[in-house]
Image: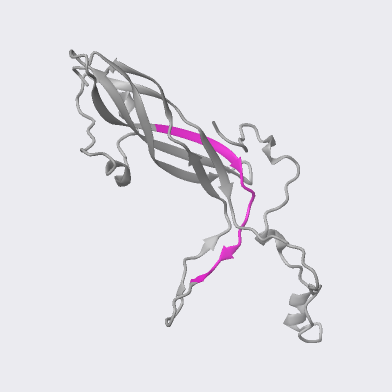
């Protein structure tokens, strides 16, 4: 790269997206989704000869969005069925939302050579690279003492959403759903009778139906991110 006189855009490939979801403390039901995109970029470097040389490198991009995902505090337990053996108990889960990112390979919009500064402030957050990303390159990635570097502008299209498990009510024919459970005992001090008078906590198992435009939160992005 130090001997290159100019560079031109080649191609870029999206390798991995690291996703972190955290609830917004001051606004219940909203979550911040922090994403870090890792790209493998191939550029054409022109030296003294007219034939370009392909150079390969890593690009990193950070993005944050705020989405509405509702609330839920139910604990979910399940087991994995194994034939002719004891069922293995799965880890405890919850019905909190899970972030999903759909993205396509980016478009190389621009590329230019820049002289490196002494402070190298652009390397502050690129020191932690997942092993799966490093394995996508033929050689070991280096943050060497190069005099010049290539800065690339990428165009990325992506869709970010929150997903969660929920129960659906499907109307059926010739089925009758019971309205209440049969009484298990009598007397005011019977714990079963006391329990039968308690309403089922539907709100703990189903997210509330927020019809008052949950996207009114300033800065919230409830649709596709671009």
Res 113 quadrant in image = top left
User: Is 187 on the left or on the right of 11, as rendered?
Assistant: right
Instruction: Name the foreground residue: 195 vs 183.
Output: 183
Vertical relation: 163 (above or below) 205: above
Residues in magenta, as a range? 61-79
- Residue 97 x/y as whole percent: 57, 51
Determine the residue positioned at 56% across, 65% down.
76
Q: Is residue 90 above or below residue 145?
A: below
The relative height of residue 182 versus residue 208 in the rendered view (above or below) is below
Query: Is residue 118 at all visible to an observer of this figure?
Result: no
Q: Position of residue 131 (x, y in %)?
A: 29, 46
The residue located at (23%, 30%) in the rendering is: 143
Instruction: Relative to 219, say whether 30 is above or below.
Output: below
Task: Judge from the rendering whether residue 39 lies leftward or rightward of residue 205; answer left or right.
Answer: left
Q: Say whether residue 68 is magenta.
A: yes
Quarter of the picture holding the C terminus: top right
> Where's residue 212, x and y in %?
75, 42
Residue 199 image point, x, y percent: 76, 68
- Can residue 138 be spotted in the picture? yes
Does the magenta portion include 154? no
């Amino acid at each position: 790269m130090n001997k290159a006189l100019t560079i031109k855009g080649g191609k870029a490939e999206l390798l991995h997206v690291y996703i972190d979801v955290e609830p917004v403390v001051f606004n219940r039901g909203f979550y911040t989704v922090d994403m870090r995109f890792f790209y493998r970029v191939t550029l054409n470097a022109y030296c003294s000869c007219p034939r370009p040389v392909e150079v390969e490198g890593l690009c990193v991009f950070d993005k944050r969005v705020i989405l509405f995902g509702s609330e839920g505090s139910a604990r979910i337990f399940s087991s994995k069925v194994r034939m002719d053996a004891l069922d293995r108990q799965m880890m405890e889960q919850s019905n909190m939302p899970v972030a999903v990112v759909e993205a396509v390979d980016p478009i190389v919009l621009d590329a230019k050579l820049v002289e490196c500064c002494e402070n190298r402030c652009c390397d502050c957050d690129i020191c932690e690279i997942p092993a799966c990303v490093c394995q996508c390159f033929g050689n070991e990635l280096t943050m060497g003492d190069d005099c010049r570097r290539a800065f690339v502008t990428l165009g990325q299209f992506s869709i970010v959403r929150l997903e969660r498990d929920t129960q659906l009510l499907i109307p059926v024919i010739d089925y009758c759903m019971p309205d209440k459970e049969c009484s298990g005992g009598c007397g005011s001090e019977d714990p079963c009778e006391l329990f039968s008078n308690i309403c089922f906590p539907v709100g703990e198992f189903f997210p509330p139906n927020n019809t008052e435009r949950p996207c009114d939160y300033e800065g919230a992005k409830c649709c596709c991110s671009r």
